[in-house]
Image (spheres, grey):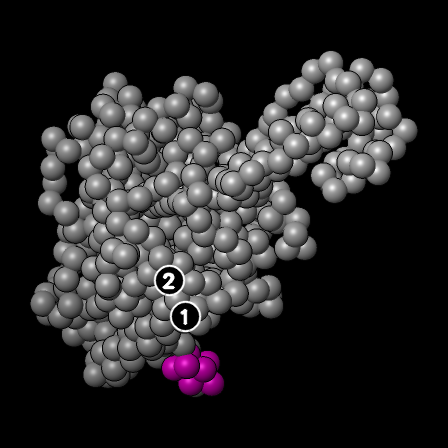
Amino acid sequence: MNSVLSISNLSKTYASGFQALRNVDLEIRRGEIFALLGPNGAGKTTLISIVCGLVNASTGRVLVDGHDIVTDYRAARSMIGLVPQELTTDAFETVWATVSFTRALFGKKPDPEHIRNVLEGLSLWDKRDSRLITLSGGMKRRVMIAKALSHEPQILFLDEPTAGVDVELRRDMWDLVEGLRKTGVTIILTTHYIEEAEQMADRVGVIARGEIILVEEKIELMRKLGRKQLSLHLQKPLERIPQSLEHHHLELSADGMYLIYTYDTRAERTGITRLLGDLNEAGIRFRDLHTSQKSLEEIFVDLVRDRR
Amino acid sequence: MNLRAVAAIYGFEMARARRTLLQSIVSPVVSTSLYFVVFGAAIGSRITEIDGISYGAFIVPGLIMLMLLTQSISNAAFGIYFPKFTGTIYEVLSAPVSYLEIVLGYVGAAASKSIILGLIILATASLFVPLRIEHPLWMVFFLMLTAATFSLFGFIIGIWADGFEKLQLVPLLIVTPLTFLGGSFYSIDMLPPVWRTVSLFNPVVYLISGFRWSFYGVSDVNVVWSLAATGGFLVACLVIVARIFRTGYRLKT
């Protein structure tokens, strides 16, 4: 596997005694979009902050394209662009000045053409001479992304990139991420919005209580854990599930009007045909049926709940 | 070395000074001019010469030092505290910038501002009193050394401070009193023997004395002691800054 980011045995305990990360191992592939999901306080931001040099790890090692983030921090950080969760911008600088400032911090020679492209790509070109204090929250978020892209990073961290932004910006962000992926940039994003991970990510990692509890291809994850449910709307309510149907492990709704059958889409036989035959034999008629598949969100909630 | 980053931080800080020209330059110049009017012209005209120097001229090095110390500290402290306060420090910490480069950028800018200010005050003083500088190179050296040392001290305060009150605490409650009692407006030879001895424990005495020597060739303490005291404080500040960055104190958790 061609890893661009390699995290091994990473732990972090804050001075307060709170353990934010516990022996995290994670490999990020070059050019992929990786979504890190987790509830509040799970350790997502701590993980990103350690990789980017904002927080000191307690133990463990992080390599960015083979460069250790402590002993070879210049090479490691040069490759990374960070869009933090909080909207933190200067107030009196212009958009152009602040984006150029970040590029210079990364030791890159001035490249007005690149800055122009970045600003145009984020619909900020018209605002290039505006002071940051005059911009709306959404515009400031765009500026922060522009800053992170100013030095042409190979790895982009987006920490909750669409938290509190409007639909238009969210869609622009998705387009931007897709565009960056085409240029070979590896993108790691943390999000609460499962929809975002579902739409954009190649792989999904789930973190809870400082531990990575799952890393999986998104499609595989949804296929593996995404069991389907068949709901049968009955013509007459049932008091209980007949004995002849017990081996199907059905659930009966509280009002007795629905029978719910859970099956695995990967299985050679889903058991639907047999179930319908058994229902017919038992004289149970239904007026409607529908199937549903678990969303990534439901899978995620299940995983985190199981962990508690 | 990431010189572009040093230049970027330096440029950012100098731009901030340009935006706040009234506060950065005009205000200290006006307040220093008031000192000259009150102590130099009004009260000073009734005070006899000190070490053969008119009182108005005698206080010039002390007044420049007073401004140099307070402005170096507040410029550097604010320079690093504000990004901490707003959160924008993240981009400096996550950039491929060494600690030395961060210090050069922030402290270099704060020291530059103070030196410019010191020279402006010197020019202003020359409008009020006749000035002579016997050792101009030493004068410039003292000016630069003091500006760099106290900008570094201010940088430490800016990192240590976790609120605006703490930012003002050291300059207002420690540095300003020490400067006033450090011979800005008098020679410590004018004090009773006991207070003269007490004054020798005030580090600012050595700074003002050395600086005044570069102007008039007279000093309260040997100029070598002045250099040693300033150099010693510079080394102490460097050690503290190195420790701050090694541990990530108040910058990284």
- The kind of residue tagged 2 is Ile
Q: From what the image shows, is residue B24 above or below residue A272? A: below
Report the disc number at residue A60.
1
Tell me where residue A130 appears, x and y as whole percent: 29, 24
What distance separates the C-alpha of mark 2 from that of mark 1? 8 Å
The residue where tag 2 is placed is A7
Q: Residue at x 60, y 68 (%)?
A: A17
Image quadrant in which you'd find residue A95 = top left
In front of the other: B26 or B189: B26
When asked about the image quadrant of residue A188, the answer is top left
Q: Is residue B198 magenta?
A: yes
Sequence-wise first label, 2 or 1: 2
Which dot marks residue B35? none
Vertical relation: A10 (above or below) A257: below
Q: Are circles 2 and 1 on residues that touch, CB within 8 Å? A: yes
Residue A294: quadrant of the picture = top right
Crowd class of label 1 (few under 14; some 14 to 19; many from 20; radius 10 Å): some
